[in-house]
Image (spheres, coloured by chain):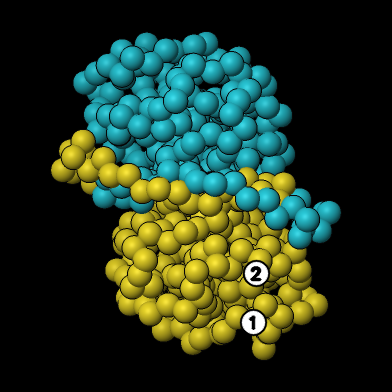
Chain colours: A yellow, B cyan
């Protein structure tokens, strides 16, 4: 499995293809001279266009104040080639270490935000905060994806899906039911 | 693959085990003498306790007014044994048909809500609406799971994960990284 991908731009309204199946993602952030990465599994697509994604980033995370202040993040999609990194990032704190350095990940410059994206991930979705009205009550952030890049291959990445308790489901086979769909429902 | 399950109660704070991996779910609803089912993929866990789940139910769906008025629903988790039903339910409208009848599904009485649950599903999460503040703007409903039942086996259901365009990812193998986790992070 590779950690090196050639990437191309993805129209932001198609981000759902990769997030709707529910993978664990790595959220990168930057603020006040620091950068950080967190592992995150509580997210949902909310709209095609504008391309909206909602997610919970607990106030207990070092990333919380960083994304709240900067109002930016990158949602990076790791494959199973990064399983150990996903677990390691989720079990350490950016208050103590630089996670790019610790986990051997490359911080590349993003196109539309000041937050670095993670080169070794399959996809990178650059986000700006558009609604923080539920942050105080639920730690719930609503982001607009303003730029998206994905690997040119494979078409379907092998992703990690967290079930709690240290256990992951790995994405399996792909099936099409396209012929059973009404045109307007695709 | 079976559509018949023996079920037991699940503590509601453990619902994340089944929803966090991102499966397509079937939302059942009831209001004003009608009942309905919709296929839904835009959801996220928001809290362990109380057990909160946020989801988008578009105003274009027949279910929208039903759940908005009744302030209740059941989130039912189908396995791949119900793939055709999942697609069929997503491509028809409750304004025209009774989906329980059309798709041969059994409406069982729920424990804590007036909405029927779907017997043939692996799990049934009974929900009450606790926050509708983002319904007008984003069609986003925040539910509290007040009662949960899951099948006694298998431990890991084979679920459907939608990627758009009529294509589903089927849940694959299970891997544990439990030994790499810090105790407090499990």
Tell whether label 2 touches label 1 (CB within 8 Å).
Answer: yes
Q: Chain of mark 1?
A: A
Q: Is label 1 on the same chain as label 2? A: yes
**In terms of image quadrants, where is residue B130?**
top right
Q: Position of residue A179 (x, y in %)?
A: 18, 40
Residue B107 in the figure: left or right of residue A88: left
Residue B87 in the figure: left or right of residue A88: left
Local secondary structure at mark 2 = helix
Res. A85 mark = 2
The reply to whether residue B45 is visible in this rendering is: yes
**In terms of sequence position, does the residue under pointer 1 or pointer 2 come before the other?**
2
Q: Position of residue A61 (x, y in %)?
A: 72, 64
Residue at 45%, 70% in the rendered image:
A122
Local secondary structure at mark 1 = loop
Question: In the depicted view, which residue is nearer to us: A104 or A29?
Answer: A104
Question: In the depicted view, which residue is nearer to us: A171 or B46?
Answer: A171
Q: Chain of mark 2?
A: A
Res. A104 mark = 1
The reply to whether residue B65 is visible in this rendering is: no
Residue at 22%, 43% in the rendered image:
A178
């Amino acid at each position: 499995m590779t950690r090196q991908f050639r990437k191309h731009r993805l129209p932001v309204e198609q981000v759902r293809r990769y997030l709707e199946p529910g993978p664990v993602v790595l959220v990168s952030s930057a603020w006040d001279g620091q950068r950080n990465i967190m592992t995150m599994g509580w997210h949902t697509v909310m709209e095609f266009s504008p391309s909206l994604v909602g997610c919970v980033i607990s106030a207990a995370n070092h990333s919380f104040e960083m994304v709240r202040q900067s109002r930016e993040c990158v949602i990076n999609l790791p494959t199973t080639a990064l399983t150990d990194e996903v677990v390691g990032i989720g079990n350490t704190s950016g208050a103590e270490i630089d996670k790019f350095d610790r986990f051997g990940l490359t911080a590349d410059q993003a196109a539309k935000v000041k937050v670095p994206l993670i080169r070794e991930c399959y996809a990178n979705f650059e986000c700006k905060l558009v609604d923080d009205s539920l942050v105080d009550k639920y730690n719930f952030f609503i982001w607009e994806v303003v730029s998206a890049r994905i690997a040119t291959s494979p078409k379907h990445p092998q992703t990690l899906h967290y079930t709690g308790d240290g256990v992951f489901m790995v994405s399996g086979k792909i099936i099409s039911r396209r012929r059973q769909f009404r045109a307007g429902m695709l």
